[in-house]
Amino acid sequence: MVVCVYMPRFELAVAVGDRSAAPPTQPEMGGADAAGGGRAPLGRALALAPQAGGEQRVGEVSGAAEGCGVTSGMALGEALARCPDLVLVTPDPVAVAEAWEGVLCALESVGAAVETARPGLAYFAVDGLRGLHGTDAATIAAARQASRSAGRRPSSTAVPPVAAGRPVRMGAGPARFCALAAALAVRSSRPLVVGEEDAHRWLASRPIGLLGYRRETEALVQPLSRLGVRTLGELRQLGRPMLADRFGMAGVLAHRLACGEEEPLQARCVQERLQETMSVGDASSGPALERVLGVLVDRLLARPERRGRALRAVTLSARLDAGGAWRERVVFRQALAAPERIRLALSARLQLLPAPAAALGLTVECFGPASGQQALLGVGPAAPGTRPTRAVRAARLREAVGQVRAAAGQDAALRAVCVDPDSRVPERRVLLTPLPG
């Protein structure tokens, strides 16, 4: 059985909670009706403002904004035309990442192997937790209690805990899509559990809008609604070949979801993370900000927890003077341990800051090998120019695969296996399988 943990409007709630810590003399939000002083309730017409430099579309919206016809992903001009009193909240990706990491760590503290879909939505299986908590109901109750008390930031930050105490909806089913439908149908503190024998019939009555919670199928909601398809049962009756002809692989996936067919959960790999933050003071931009970045790099490399390992991927973040935050993930071309090369790679990303910064942060997302173990693929371990041994080449190839996956995801490095080389269909000749590394 799969359990879905859903926190409605998580990013909007975190952004609004962070604005409540601002002094009363400063505007908390910008927009058609900026609020000042005190916490802005989610009962107002709120929406996350577009990211600086990105497409001009609003993010998550409150229930009052939805009542006026504003939806997530709508163009900014159309949203303001539909709701002139709409308040635009500055997004805070740094606070969202910190708060959601706290929720995931809290779920993992009760023994759950969590798969995260996006901030505010996660899944885990309860089959392996019955020995710890006794029953499925006790496991769900423990996860609910942990997620409600999570979301607290480290004591070193001055931002209050805004995710703690947020409403949590939990549903359970034989697959993640059924569990998501159950969590969205919950209207009280009690979780909704859908049995395997009732899942097929229960999913048939669910609205077609559930496809919008999957990135691969969210673009199908509007076309299917225009065609008159209102429920997953009606979508199932259209048939998989017809959906494949009209929508391609997205249509096939939508039909599989409506039938309750899904891949097993892929729990996230728990990795060690190191973080350094520093208030920049008057050095909010320019060369002075680069010197602050150099101090952060030196502090991070001097941490004893690094244990001589190189850095493969880091996250550069900043809190802005005007409110909100900025976050950028950087994957190096190769694992680095030299501070000069790391500063050179990160200083170019400082040019992407949308506004002067008040604080700068640097977090290690992925470690590489120890700095003394890195070498070129064509250089042997002892004498340069000699042919490396088979074991050395295999170790370096594994490191190269890990570097590619850190940059482009787990499916970036695949191996071609000849299955039917004499077939007339090209897709049947070669099969792509994960490359061990």
Image (cartoon, rainbow, N blue to C red):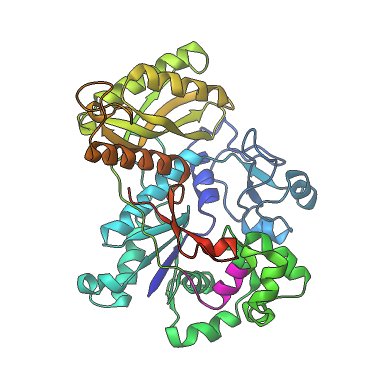
Please state, as top left, top right, bottom left or bottom right, where the N terminus lies in the image: bottom left
From this view, report whether residue 162 is shown above or below residue 168: above
Report the magenta residues as a range.
252-262
From this view, report whether residue 309 is shown above or below residue 279: below
Viewer can see residue 58: yes
Viewer can see residue 210: no
Q: Position of residue 270 (x, y in %)?
A: 30, 50
Residue nearer the viewer, 267 or 350: 267
Q: Residue at the location (65% across, 41% down)?
A: 50
From this view, report whether residue 151 is shown above or below residue 376: below
Q: Position of residue 287 (x, y in %)?
A: 49, 11
Classify residue 287 as left or right of residue 75: left
Q: Quadrant of residue 114?
A: bottom left
Name the chief secondary structure element in magenta. Answer: helix
Q: Position of residue 8 (x, y in %)?
A: 52, 59
Residue nearer the viewer, 197 or 121: 197
Q: Quadrant of residue 139?
A: bottom left
Q: Let me know if residue 397 is in the magenta part.
A: no
Residue at the far front in the pictured view: 422
Residue nearer the viewer, 421 or 121: 421
Q: Let me know if residue 258 is in the magenta part.
A: yes
Classify residue 418 as left or right of residue 250: left
Q: Residue at the location (32% across, 71% down)?
A: 126
